[in-house]
Image (cartoon, rainbow, N blue to C red):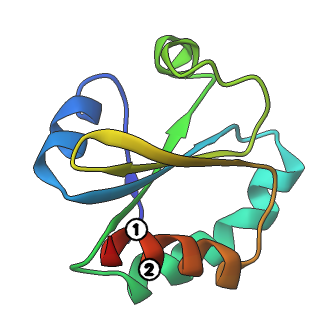
Amino acid sequence: MIQHLDKTNFEQTIADNQVVLVDFFADWCGPCKALHPALEELANDFDGKAVISKINVDQNPELAAQFKVRSIPALFYFKNGEIVGTQNGVHSKSVISSHLNNILKN
C-alpha cells in the first residue's frame, strides 16, 4: 500500500525505513495520474523491502521546496535517510522496479 506523507510523518518515515521511494505529485497532474497504477503495483511488489510513498505538492509546498521539485511527477529514492537517486516524469514499472532493486542490492 502506498503511504501518503506530509510534514508530520516524512522525516520519521525516511529515518525508520532503509529504502523509500517518494513520488511528488498533484491531483491535477495527468502524468502523475498515469504513474499511479505502477506505483500501486510496486507497493505490493516491494512490501517489506521498500516503502512506496507519495507527497502532494499542493498540500505540502514546504517539502516540495526543500527538495527543489520543479516538475512533477518527481521520484526521489532514499536509502538510509540519504537521496540516492531521482527521476522526473513518467517511467514504466519495470524501470522503477529495476532502480529499486539496484538500491536494495547496494
Q: Quadrant of residue 34?
A: bottom right
Amino acid on which disc 1 is placed: Ile
Q: Quadrant of residue 73?
A: top right
Classify residue 34 as left or right of residue 75. Answer: right
Q: Which residue is mark 1?
A: 103
Question: Percent x, y for residue 57?
Answer: 61, 27
Q: Which residue is mark 2?
A: 101
Camera-nearest residue between 63 and 33: 63
Which residue shows up at 88% across the image and 51% down it? 30
Considering every residue shown, the one lying at the far right of the view is 30
Which residue shows up at 57% across the image and 70% down it? 39
Classify residue 36 as left or right of residue 51. Answer: right
Answer whether labels 2 and 1 touch (C-beta < 8 Å).
Answer: yes
Quadrant containing the C terminus is bottom left
Secondary structure at numbered mark 2: helix
Classify residue 93 as left or right of residue 20. Answer: right
Question: Percent x, y for residue 43?
Answer: 43, 75
Amino acid on which disc 2 is placed: Asn
Note whether 59 is above or below 40 in the view shown: above
